[in-house]
Amino acid sequence: MKKVIKTANEVSEQIIQWGESHEIDTCFDRAQRLKPCPIGASGACCKICHMGPCRFVGRNAEKEAKGVCGATLPTVASRNLLRMAVGGAAAHSDHARDMAFILLAVANGEAKDFKITDARKLYRVAEILGIEFGSGRSAKDVARDVALKFLEDFGRQKGEINYVKRAPKKTQERWKKWGIVPRGIDREITEAMHRTHMGVDHDPDNLLLGTLKVSLADGWGGSMISTDITDILFGTPRPVKAEASFGIFKEDEVNIVVHGHEPSLAEMIVDVVSEPEMIAYAKSKGAKRINLGGMCCTANEVLMRHGIPTAGGFTNQELAVMTGLIDVLTVDIQCIMPALVGLSRKFHTKVITTSYKAKIPGAIHIQYDEHRAKEIAREIVKIAIDNYPNRKAEGSHVSQKYPLIAGFSHEYIEYMQGGSWRASFRPLNDAIMAGRIRGVVGLAGCDNPRVPSQGIHRFLAIELIKADILIVTTGCGSHACGGAGYMTPEMALENAGPGLREVCEAIGIPPILHVGACVDNSRILTIATAMAEEGGLSDEIGGMPAVGIAPEWMSEKAIAIGCYFAASGVPVIFGGESPVGASEEVTRIMTEVWFERFKGALHFEPDPEKILALTLNYIDRAREALKLRKYEPGRFGIERVLMDMAARRELERAAKPHLGIY
Amino acid sequence: MSRIIASAAIRGAHKVIQQAEDMLERAITERDEGFTFEFPDTAYYLPMIYGMTGFAVKTLGDMRVALGMAKELLHPEPEEHLWKPYLGEALDSGMATLFAEEVIMALRYINGLEPAVDPETGYIYNGFITDTVQRNLGIQLVDGTMPGFAAVIGAAPDGDTAVRIIRELQEKNILIFLSGHVNGNSVTKQLLRKGIELGWDTRIVPVGPDTEHTIYPLNWSVRASFIFGGRKGGDFKGHLKYTKDRVFAFALVLGELDDLKWSTGAGAINMGYPAVCDTDVPVIHPTGVCTYEEVDKEFDHSKIVQKAIEVRGLKIIVEKPPIPVAYGPAFEGERIRKEDMFIEFGGTRTLSFEWVRMREMEEIEDGKVIIVGNNWQERYEQGGQMPLGIVVDVAGRKMQKDFESVIERKIHSNINEAQGVWHMGQRDINWMRISHNAKKEGFTLEHLGIINAVMTHNRFRAIVDKVQVTIYTDEADVLSLQEEARKVYRERDQRTAGLVDEAVDIFYSCLLCQSFAPTHVCVISPERLGLCGAFNWLDCKAAYEIDPTGGNQPIPKGELIDARYGRYTGIDEYLRKASGGAVETLNLYTIMQNPMTSCGCFECIIAIVPEANGVMIVQRGHTGMTPVGMKFSTLAGSVGGGTQNPGFMGIGRNFIVSKKFLYGDGGIKRIVWMTKNLKESLEEAFGKRAAEEGVPDLLDKVADETICEDSERLLEFLTSVGHPALEMEPLL
């Protein structure tokens, strides 16, 4: 039998093999055993009501297949997609709501373990929201107004969510023209659930516009709110040096993993593990220290701000347990495999759930409450320390790890291009105009055991930087790159194309910039907006030589993200088979029609080579449309305009034309 | 690679801040925190720190605060491997270095060490560059005669190379600042050893011997943004955008670099000024902080100037006549002392004149130079003195009689810009000298003709189709033609005297300064010349003919709405458009309501003295106090930048003796105080105007700095002499 390659991550592969030899079952094995249902996978199954499930299959199903109610394949495929986007938008936004409540609690002095760490960011956000600050107003008063203003976004019935105005004017105009400006986050989610109920919305185009609308409520609503509040409470990321992969766990230290997506408890644990009393307690149990590692996007949150090492992304979670070195795996919300609990029983690892929204039978549940956050964190750390002596020899005990540089917030990316005095996006725009950088790709999304996991990420990362494309990465895309050792500045010198290398060298950055958790894809939206405002490229997000790729996506959040990027004007390419692949009409709308309306699109393309080709094609076409110089590797430069005095006088006339009378 | 530069810049910043702190603490121990300091003749405190932070450093204690700000900009050096990004951090360190250098220079002034003196030669460096220099250079900065600035740091491999580089910069009209050294050797010393004339007159300005002195040209250049750009302290984004877009400065770094040079360079890159080095340094090519490359290298010294100009994105068109000596505005200020002189003409020593005549196209031959005189060659070869008449005949389809005087006034620059040739005066009171060196290079009388033929073409391309120059050297010829010329001079003067605002339908705008002061518009009428003193109505008319889309545009004056204050519909309509609505209306003849805006390079400032019911006038360069309690530099700071400031106004000197001077406010009789310099230079014309106004002894009743510098004593004086302003209707 041909050996199945389960992952492209060599360290993971070692653990998987160790697991196989110990008859331990993981998502990789289950993915092999459990093939996806081909009807549901392509969007051709409707189980909205109990007359079905109805299957839309057969020759010319697009035109001829009907459900019991008479629904067609395009209706069903688009309705299914909208349902996925709702799930994603709800996940990010509910997370954001909790963050807003924490901010409010901090402002009201009810969450003593938290503070406003980045007042500058608070004021910047206040400025955008039109909230008064400075002139004697305390930070807490400003924070309260900010929190309340954000909370309005959830329950607002009419009008538009606050951050719509952050988008470039032209982008907003497109949203208005097509009626997809989100009003209130909860309203859009409820409305989307309503219109996908049996017997409501049946027009595929209308359903897909609804998909974009609810997704925008995520991108420019929930996700952006979450990013901003997290920066305010825990600091806006700046570059940190850290480590990735399973070698971060220590044989002689208490190992705790924070897993999931919320930063607030994890931040407390970060503080608690360095408390002298805790360390002393760990020593009393024979451990040298307490070692904290991250997993998934909780990892990204604490990696970006504190350099806490990361064990990896979604497909790495079981493997972490299988190192045999984890004393406590504490989880919050999202992307947590219930398999962890069963698996942990084979080792000494204790799995602790912390959100009433996310319980797993068999796990220890310690309900998190921001009002007594540190106390809970200490309780968890104590359980880990107490569990340390129970550690058995059992486990894969791998030791490889890779260094990485993370911490590229929007603010730092702006700073790094000119320092405190000249911070701007001019150098990036210049580099794109000059052809040093061919374009920008957001490499994001999940990793997936249905393909050699993290492999497509790795393939694309290498090929894209070779082609002078700057990568910004989030979520499990960043874990895939980090665990491959790609996020180092040396990577640029050794593997990037000549133009990208020059830019990376000038600034001192890796060619792949870690911008945060999956919720922080919102940073990419504001970065693209800043690029539009800086001038010289497109004057809206649409039309930029930029593409979003989620090559190994699997979650509903990914669909919401892909759709808010498409609506904002970014062509997006997802890997894997299309969840709407059964319907040509739906596929056409999401690519051609969306591109015409929004300059964005959502493609599904399983072949990595084709993803690459499509990406380069989008980027080169955008360059052409912007009349930028044709990309040629190793040849770049802005046409030098030498200024004489008359040209200098003209500088201001662009804004204020000089009108001679004659 | 760039990391090496960043590391050096960051290290340099740490060291120089430490040095500044040590010096400061010593100074505070010796004096105290409250000890006050200001650089000579500036309204902008420590200009770099003030520009960037808005913090006005006035005392030693303030310097401590400023260094605290600099320290916040420090970062650790990037590591060997797995480094964190360093560009923003290096640029921050660069700015920190500029702050520290500015404090160091202030402390050196306090300790009497500035301007620095070269211990070997006794040469005195320039030291801090004043606001006045900025304003004096105003028109040259905008009309293209001074298109850029080079900071030359370090030392060339040898003296000859140093001279070649400097000469090339001079010929390209670039203002040169020298600082820094390599192991004690410097371009300043190299030029001194070669006997090159240094200073503002030759546009070679050694500011000091060390790298730290580079802060002087940098904090001088940021003042262009204050003075002409109208930006305020603390508007760092505005200042740095201004310097990047409008101040075409760059550094030529000759010889090895140390940490402080890199760090100072990083500071300059913040301002958009790139550096080109002649050593094998790492380069930074990606653009965006600077317009083009940030750091580049060029080993060939014959190409390094051109390279730097391109890297800065500067276009320089050099119009050089075919003569055997160097040519350009940089040589205009050069003096020829008696002992260096080979021959001279005019200056009351011999008969002499210069005269531009309009001719018909068929009467002259283009480019022809005729020299008339017996044995003129032999007589020239003997040197000494000679009579000389220069007649420039011009013809052109667009030529007008009125342009004769405009073209004639350029003869001064035409001749003076040749290296080793000196000219002053005009008409029949001109005076010229040719140096031994120029003679040795082969300069002859013919070249005087060639210069005028070529440069008249270059400067007046659109008006002049043919130029022929005749030079007369025999006394009889010169005498008779001089008589003829004098007749024409008189006719011209009469015509100019009759050229009043009422007599024309069109005024002109002057937008030349918009390259530096983007919101300012000068309105120039026959009776009100530009505030820089360089452009009158006729100049504008000619300039418009030369370049119809250029800096001088016609303003049909339209209807007169207010004869007393000089408000015209045409001006208002034009201004609204040209200022983008910033200026709605303008009164030409008053200081009190909607007066003219100012760019920053005005020759004089008028300010009302309410107690005296009159106005005072102070000229650029006057460093003393005035009766309104502000020095010129402070007054200027509140006038420039293209805004209307009732009660304050920048003007050209000659406007004072115009009939339209403050016509609506009572005219020349309102002047209660005026500097001695102005009184002396305007004496004759002032007397005439005063007589017309019925107060022939007005000048004696006007106070100056020798009488008083405060309003109290001014009032005493005015009362004692019975100044008419005291009896006039209230100004306010």
Image: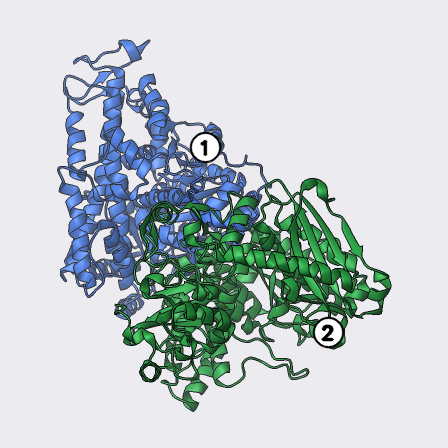
Chain colours: A blue, B green
From this view, report whether residue A76 is shown above or below residue B106. above
User: Which element type, helix, strand or loop, lies under badge 2?
Assistant: loop
Q: Quadrant of the C terminus of chain A?
A: top left
Rendering quarter of residue A454: top left
Label 1 marks a residue whose chain is: A
Judge by depth and name the residue closer to the eye, B553 or A254.
B553
Rendering quarter of residue A637: top right
Judge by depth and name the residue closer to the eye, B416 or B390.
B390
Q: Which amino acid type is shown beneath numbered disc 2?
A: Gly
Judge by depth and name the residue closer to the eye, A204 or A171.
A171
User: Which element type, helix, strand or loop, lies under badge 1?
Assistant: helix
Judge by depth and name the residue closer to the eye, A91 or B43.
B43
Q: Position of residue B588 (x, y in %)?
A: 37, 57
Q: Is residue B311 left or right of residue A457?
A: right
Q: Is residue B602 left or right of residue B576?
A: right
Would residue B371 be visible to someone looking at this image? yes
Work out whether disc 1 and disc 2 sit on a shared chain. no
Label 2 marks a residue whose chain is: B
Q: Which residue shows up at 44% across the image and 38% down it?
A: A457
Q: Which amino acid type is shown beneath numbered disc 1?
A: Ala
Give the residue pinned by disc 1. Answer: A622
Sort mark 1 into few (<14), some (14-19) or many (20+) by Cα contacts within 10 Å.
many
Give the residue pinned by disc 2. Answer: B195
Marks 1/2: CA distance?
A: 60 Å
From this view, report whether residue B722 is shown above or below residue B151. below
